[in-house]
Image (spheres, grey):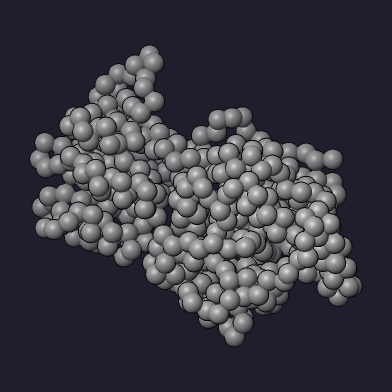
Amino acid sequence: MATETARPTVPIIPFEDTEPMHEGCSCGRRKPKAALSPLLYDNLVIAARDRAREPELPAATEQHVLATPVASRLATYDVIVLGAGLEARERESRVASEFARHEQRVFHIGNHPVPDHRPTAPLLYRLPYPPGSLQDFLATARERDGIEAAIVVSFAPLDATLVQTMREKWNWRVAVPSTVDGESQALADLIIDFDVEAAESPAADRVSLPPKMAWPSRWGVLNRRFRVLWLRASVIVLTHDNLAFSRMCVASILENTEYPNYELIVVDNASQDGTRQEMERIAQTVRHVRVITNDHNAGFGPGNNQALAAATGDLLFLLNNDTMVPRGWLTRLARHLADDELGLIGPATNRTCNEAQIDLRYQTWAEYQTEARRLARQHDGERHPIRMPMMFCTGFRRDFYEHVGPLDERYEVGMFEDEDYALRAKAAGYQVAWTPEVYVHHAYHASIGKLLPTGDYMRLIELNKGRFEEKWGISWVRHRPMPQKFA
């Protein structure tokens, strides 16, 4: 029997800021939250130095993680404001300042009296227009400052080639005021009508900000409209005990998923170590998190199928609870899924069974993120065919899921679902691939590996191998990691 807690109605408007305003103040800033000891901090050891792929956590790490609940520190998208000169300076400055007040990084590019890359207010950077190519300037800023998902609010005319690059290569979105030229409006994802009353039946690509609407409220309207410019994604995590790994996984998702429009669905398979209670606590404080609880261990396939059936996203991602993700992971994987010919996409990792394994030397949380960002810059936009993207982290579109169907539940507890799903994808005419630009840390078999000492692990492999071979009429061949080419 399964029960679901905190399941919202559809459609969902995620990430609504519900912290109280400063009393007697219209600045739009929230009361500072009490400082919490972070679960993930730079020097937290997440892997062995000489072999970053052991499922066991160091004792000090486990002790810290078990004593530190996940705090709802949420990553968010960046804002880039392209100025148009004196006529729009006040309005563009208000947009930039308001988003910066809400703890979003804002890069305001324009003709400023004293341009400076240092923040002039918390998270607000005022930069001069470049003398050369704006596209090259933004590409450099994207790499230098680690900009992943971003909304570009342009008060200046737009260039079609730049917009195509921003949307297709960087997964950015573009909004313009209705005062810009018609060609720029046609290129934009959203048109903003400043100081205009809302129409009774507004167009899908327009948003109105009435004259009497205060700027804090305008931020709320724009934030909601900006977020839905990206396809909704559903991230699914299965848990069965392993509270320490589950906390680290969920904390990394919340802190490093700046993708603007996603939900996190956790399916707990009858955990007995406090995992269910911790996931439900998180769901009560973070609006885009949902929890489905089972009174027995339903297994990998059935548990993921429960979540897939409940998911509201157009993009669907399966993620193991013994993983940790870097900033930009979802934005970059989602960009690949814009290709209709692609069925399954997976990342690189420290531990898997095939060529997606890249051995990097890191030990701490900060070292891991530095290495992941280096690979993202080095392999930006790359992807390669693969026999099977392992389901510790796999993404696919809803139309693919509706065509191919749910995971095959004959494999029960787990193993061979990913091999099976890849063959089904190829049989349906889709490509399957992996990308070295996203590097997900994987503890590998943190849950199912507990069967090793009893011998049940090998028995399960042989059982599911037989089921797989009987279904497909082939002899399964073991995967082998390829020689390193991507590190």
User: Can residue 276 be seen here?
Assistant: no
* Residue at the image position 38 percent from the left and 67 percent from the top: 377
67 relative position to 194: left or right = right
Q: Position of residue 297 (x, y in %)?
A: 83, 52
- Closest to the observer, 445 or 101: 445
Place residue 127 in its image quadrant.
bottom left
Q: How many marks?
A: 0
Q: Position of residue 475 (x, y in %)?
A: 78, 65
- Closest to the observer, 117 or 80: 80
Q: Position of residue 245 (x, y in %)?
A: 67, 64
* Residue at the image position 69 percent from the left and 38 percent from the top: 309
Q: Reply above or below: 200 against 310.
A: above
10 relative position to 271: left or right = left
* Residue at the image position 56 percent from the left and 44 percent from the top: 397
As drawn, which residue projects farthest toward the front? 473
Q: Position of residue 87 (x, y in %)?
A: 11, 36
User: Can residue 123 be seen here?
Assistant: yes
* Residue at the image position 50 percent from the left and 44 percent from the top: 340
408 relative position to 19: left or right = right
As drawn, which residue projects farthest toward the top? 200
